[in-house]
Amino acid sequence: MDSGSATIDIDFTALARHIKAWGIELGFAKVGIAGVDLDEDEARLLEWLRQGRHGTMDYMQRHGTRRSRPDELQPGTVRVISARMDYSPTGADADAAWQTLRDGEHAYIARYALGRDYHKLIRGRLQKLADRIATETGPFGYRAFADSAPVLEKALARNAGLGWIGKHTLLLDRDAGSWFFLGELYTDLPLPVDAPSTAHCGTCTRCIEVCPTQAILGPYQLDARRCIAYLTIESKDAIPEDLRPLIGNRVFGCDDCQLVCPWNKFAQPTHEEDFAPRHGLDSIKLVELFAWTEAEFLKKTEGMPIRRAGFAGFMRNLAVALGNAPHSTEVVDALQARVDDPSPLVREHVAWAIAQQSAKGAKT
């Protein structure tokens, strides 16, 4: 955090209005301001960790209470400026996504990961926002985050009036659904805070019912160990065999709970060209991706979220999807080509997939 702000002669109410307007000018869809009291959210986080629902994400525990106490992560923080940036390339049109999910020969990649990695883009916009604020206030204390540090971003965004946390544990805005990224500016400016959003899920349980692996145990209860986003991105281990058939053709993340949510009918297409799908990854065949070399993977995913899975992890995911794909000679040949893959992780999943394909072939 930069040097402390000089608070003399600053109209913080007017400044808050300006910050929101400047945020919109910089490409954010909505900006709000929250305080730093997250006691209730901290209690829920600690209980979630106690139950082990974070799986192998050990960093969740290592960070301790810094995630739920902004002033511990960044000393001097008294307010959080929360900003939302939409990323859906198609807005409310979910038909193409559902069509891909029904087509077992093509890969499904979570919509957020089809374009450029959002971390640098959002942090860059937040830095511009901070620079603009400094022209009005002089030097002030701040630090920008975009899913890049232990931050309870959804709770802060809720408190800043950007939306409510839905039963699937994602943030929802009644005018935009959930297809958006969040970013934060922790600051020492004593800005007026916005009213927290109220919940509007009502009796709807579609997200719970649609989850392929039943990772949403109940309203607001997610077990990451069963979540496809965790299994295909965060986890570097073998995917549990009982969950593999449920993953279908989802090779990087999962959007089902968002695709089925009624509030996403209000989502708008993004205006950010960086979030547009690259390399045809929104409609690419599994066998084509499985033929990539590591060099191709590194080249084609440069600057994209997919890099997070790593080459072996991505091949692991694709092997599972190919095992779930309709039986064909093309799929079997693709799997056979990696039966001696250098990675034990990939070899194990390829062997499983071949067995699945053999069983399907025996029935035809």
Image (cartoon, helix red, strand yellow):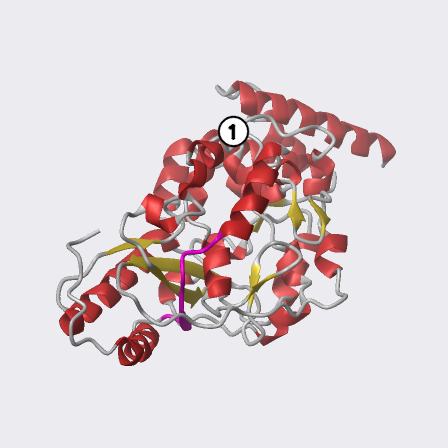
Q: Position of residue 69 (x, y in %)?
A: 41, 47
Q: Position of residue 55 (x, y in %)?
A: 58, 32
Q: Is 32 situated left or right of 254 in this image? A: left
Query: Residue type at mark 1?
Result: Lys
The magenta segment is 28-38
Q: Is 145 situated left or right of 256 in this image? A: left
* Residue to which mark 1 is pinned: 236
Q: Position of residue 227 (x, y in %)?
A: 63, 42
The answer to which of 195 and 18 lies nearer the viewer is 195
Q: Position of residue 275 (x, y in %)?
A: 41, 61
Q: Is 103 situated left or right of 139 in this image? A: right
Residue ID at (37%, 53%) = 146
Q: Is residue 74 magenta?
A: no
**Which quadrant of the rendered structure holds the C terminus?**
top right
Residue lying furthest right in this view?
363
Q: Which image quadrant is residue 12 in?
A: bottom left
Q: Is 221 situated left or right of 117 in this image? A: right
Residue lying furthest front in this view?
8
